[in-house]
Image (spheres, coloured by chain):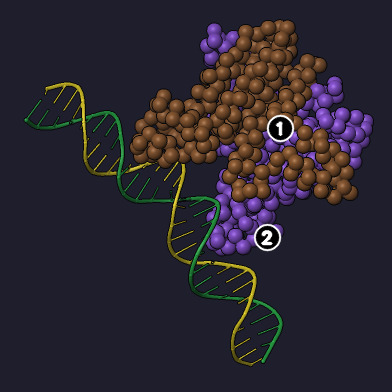
Chain colours: A brown, B purple, C yellow, D green
Amino acid sequence: MEQVVDTALGVIATEGYEALTMRRLAGELDTGPASLYAHVVNKADLDELLIGRLFAELALPEPDPAAWREQLRDVCAGMRDQYLRYPGISRATLAAAPTDVEILRVGEGLLAILLTGGVAPQAAAWAVDALLLYVAAYCLELSIAHQRAAHEDTAWVVDRDELLRRVTALPAAAFPHTTRLAAELTAGEGHDRFDFTLGLMIDGLASR
Amino acid sequence: MEQVVDTALGVIATEGYEALTMRRLAGELDTGPASLYAHVVNKADLDELLIGRLFAELALPEPDPAAWREQLRDVCAGMRDQYLRYPGISRATLAAAPTDVEILRVGEGLLAILLTGGVAPQAAAWAVDALLLYVAAYCLELSIAHQRAAHEDTAWVVDRDELLRRVTALPAAAFPHTTRLAAELTAGEGHDRFDFTLGLMIDGLASR
DNA sequence: TTCCATAAACGAACGGCGTTCGCATCGAGC
DNA sequence: GCTCGATGCGAACGCCGTTCGTTTATGGAA
């Protein structure tokens, strides 16, 4: 069963989550799809095991009252990178039960950082939810975009220039702000947008 | 084609997005699945049409510098309610092209509110992205939870009490904060969590 | 009114998905 | 050496999105 999870993660890492089918996974293990059901009750169950493994590999820091913002950012960045190592797997997270023990472990870690940082209990509790949700959604969106760029036959390679060109080509009468801020809207290398939104939330938490 | 979109939305409204298959939709229109492809190039294309219709029905306020926070909240709440009228459809949004004209229209509206409120251009541009993403993710998560509660044979009805019981039953040694804040973690009627996270982001924007 | 070109609609099928069922196969206990 | 229970798996089921070749309906020309 350990081996099943390992193999599944391998498939996802190289071909993306949508390539992970029971048949593909069985083939990778030189057997038929039926045999998988001896080790895993469901595809949904498999998904949960995958998410569990993903979160299990995430290291949590010892809470430091002076550095709670950076620590929060670090843990979220860790989750992000973990998600992106297995493109598209964040889809499974949104469907996963919030009672998985490894997810709870990370939640506990986030909660500890927030409380140590002096955030009020109710705010901290809800912030954990918000952060987990945002990171998963961000990675899901990114994975879908990548997948499109790779799969779709040309013309979906929306590099920044192409996107900028398309936005500036909009009718300025109907989209005054959008066209004027085309540069800002399409700006952002790497995870700048991710950092921005996380900063937004953390600043919001700090100002309560 | 208009009729196809209408019927599809009807199916989603009553049975959820995952029930919308080409066959089901065709059946609803008293025809075979092949006939749909005369009006719609793809299921992906259909999804985009649905999202377009969804966003088209969203009313945007005239930006008011004194009320930009409330206006932002209102538009986001409108999106949220629109998503929830068609459970699960937010899944299609995350996959939808950001170049759909109706999505751009809403983006323009959000941008106008933010800029009128005095938010810096770069922050405003990225905030639009963050808000759209968060609302879609929130609704997706909610839809999945509802679907589970309805579909799964009992025992997934995680009402607040059941969830609270399960959280407090965790080993307090490994999850000190989680168990201590069980009440806070499971708190939140209606869209309290939604309001909280939006407030977090908006406060973050205001403090820049 | 008759005829035919053209476009729209459709029945049937394809390949692939998750999942199940019942038959082989094999090792352990008598 | 023989039986018997557990394990593994080939084949199939009922779905899915999509395509192909044919049938049907339409509307302008003769």
Q: Which element is circle 2 on?
A: loop
Q: Position of residue B113 (x, y in %)?
A: 87, 36
Residue found at x 52% / y 31%: A13
- Tell me: C24 left or right of A146: left
Secondary structure at numbered mark 1:
helix
Chain letter for mark 2: B
Disc tally is: 2
* Amino acid residing under circle 1: Tyr
Image quadrant occupied by the C terminus of chain A: top right
Q: Say whether residue D13 is left or right of residue B119.
A: left
**Nearest the eye: B183 or C27:** C27
Against A68, is A44 above or below? below
Please report, as a chain letter, where disc 1 is located. Answer: B
Examine the rendering and report whether any part of residue B186 can be seen: no
**Residue B174 pos. (x, y %):** 54, 10
Which residue position is annotated with label 1? B134
Which residue is located at x 82 percent, y 45 percent? A168
Label 2 Cα crowd, 10 Å radius (few <14 / some 14-19 / many 20+): few
B6 to the left or right of B176: right
Image quarter of residue B128? top right
The percent coordinates of residue A122 (x first, y second) are: 71, 17
- Residue B6 visible in rendering: yes
As drawn, the label of residue B1 is 2
The image shows residue B203, relative to residue A71, as above or below, that is below
Q: Residues within 10 Å of mark 1 (few under 14, many from 20)?
A: many
Figure quadrant of residue B203: top right
Whether pointer 2 and pointer 1 mark residues with C-beta atoms closer than 8 Å, the reply is: no
Q: Nearer the viewer, residue A75 or B172?
A: A75
